[in-house]
Image (cartoon, rainbow, N blue to C red):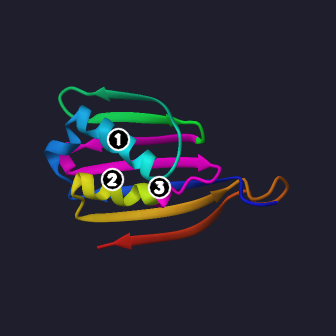
Amino acid sequence: METKSQHLLIELFGCNIDALEDRALLTNLLEEAAVAADVTIVQSVFHQYSPQGVTGVVIIEESHLSIHTWPEYGYASVDFYTCGNGEPEKALHVIQNGLDAKRSEVMMVDRGKSLTDAAMGIKYHKTDE
């Protein structure tokens, strides 16, 4: 069986603190990343926490792209789950640049590889320093 989907997990460190706190900027950034990945946006929902931080999800026809920010640590985690012909790795560079991340850790997981054996497989896991 071919892989049914891809799951890109992104850890971003040393990010611009103001960007991590800006709900409108993060909404635009993730929507721009979805377009770069060639997926179809359905709806975006973002929430501003008090005293700080933002969480948001861009629902796409192919699944979802989400972010959670911790401005007090300059840290963001991003989760991009997609099936179909989208290219989630193209979203990575948009998000890294938009948050001015100094360091990242990225893992790509193939999902749905088998219905009878191990269904997940790590395609790669890398740290960018």
> Outermost residue, left direction?
18
Place of residue 12 in the rendered image (x, y in percent of width and height, measured from the top left) = 31, 57
Residue at (77% x, 60% y) in the render: 2
* Residue bounds of the magenta highlight: 63-89
Front residue of 95 and 101: 95
Q: Is residue 75 magenta?
A: yes
Badge 2 crowding class, 10 Å Cα cut-off, few under 14, some 14 to 19, many 20 or more, is many
Q: Which residue is mark 1?
A: 68
Q: Is residue 110 above or below residue 81?
A: below
Q: CA distance from mark 2 to mark 3?
A: 12 Å
Write down the residue under mark 3.
Answer: 9
Residue at the image point whose x is 72% and y is 58% from the top? 3
Which amino acid type is shown beneath numbered disc 2?
Ile
Amino acid found under the numbered disc labelled 1: His
Point out the frontmost of discs 2 and 1.
Answer: 2
Q: Position of residue 91 (x, y in %)?
A: 42, 54
Horizontal arrangement in the rendering, residue 123 relative to residue 68 (left or right):
right
Q: Which mark is residue 127?
A: none
Residue 126 vs 88, above or below: the answer is: below
Disc 2 versus disc 1: distance between alpha carbons?
12 Å
Image quadrant occupied by the N terminus: bottom right
Q: Where is mark 2, residue-wise? A: 95
Mark toward the start of the polypeptide (3 vs 1)? 3
Specify the amino acid type for callout 3.
Leu
Q: Position of residue 68 (x, y in %)?
A: 35, 41
The earlier-in-sequence mark between 2 and 1 is 1
